[in-house]
Image (cartoon, rainbow, N blue to C red):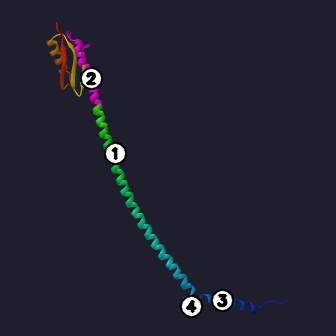
Amino acid sequence: MYKPTVKAGAIAAAVALMLALGGCSKTDDNKTAGQKLDGAIAATEQKAAEIKAEVKDAAAEARVESKTAMAEVKAEVKDATASAKASGEKTVTTIGGKIDDAAITASVKTGLARDPDLSAIKIDVDTKNGVVTLIGPAPTSIARDRATEIAKAVKGVTSVSNQLAVKAG
């Protein structure tokens, strides 16, 4: 049997070393494998720097767009809030006006009921925006005028339209 000697092992190692060094030798473009690797690393680092700059620019642009969008949303919310507030105030004023008109009507009817010559049941009292309208019968012109004075004395009355008819006889 053939037994490899140290000499044969040394020759095999030398061949392997020459083959390995052959890979590091200069190629057709006069660059070694190490130089090519360094070039590839440098190109990769350059591309990574470019991508990083692009991402940074995109992030900055996104922040600007986000701030602009937030400002627009805030403005829209502010406008909607102002509109809702104005609408609410108008509704409260309208409701308040209706409540005030109802209170005026009730107060005028109460005043007419206290008068011995006027009939709060027969006299129709209507109030709109503080203007009181009296419709129905009055026994005398003095009682008719007194109805106007009773209505004018109620808080919130701006004017009185007395359409009471004096009964004949």
Q: Earlier in the sequence, mark 4 or mark 2?
A: 4
Q: In whole angstroms, how far apart are the C-alphas of marks 4 and 2? A: 107 Å
Q: Is residue 50 left or right of residue 21?
A: left
Q: Which class describes the residues within 10 Å of circle 4: few (<14), some (14-19), or many (20+)? A: few
Query: 53 left or right of 5?
Result: left
Residue 58: image location, x then y, percent: 42, 65
The mark closer to the camera, 4 or 1, is: 1
Majority SS type along the magenta span: helix
Task: Give residue 129's position: percent from left, percent from top.
Answer: 23, 28
Q: Which residue is mark 4?
A: 28
Q: Which residue is mark 1?
A: 80
- Cα–Cα gap, marks 2 and 1: 34 Å
Q: Nearer the N terminus, badge 3 or badge 1?
A: 3
Residue 103 is marked as 2
Q: Which residues are magenta?
A: 95-124
Q: Residues within 10 Å of mark 3 (few under 14, many from 20)?
A: few
Q: Residue at x 26, y 25 (%)?
A: 101
Q: Amino acid at mark 4?
A: Asp
* Label 2 neighbour load within 10 Å: few <14, some 14-19, many 20+: some
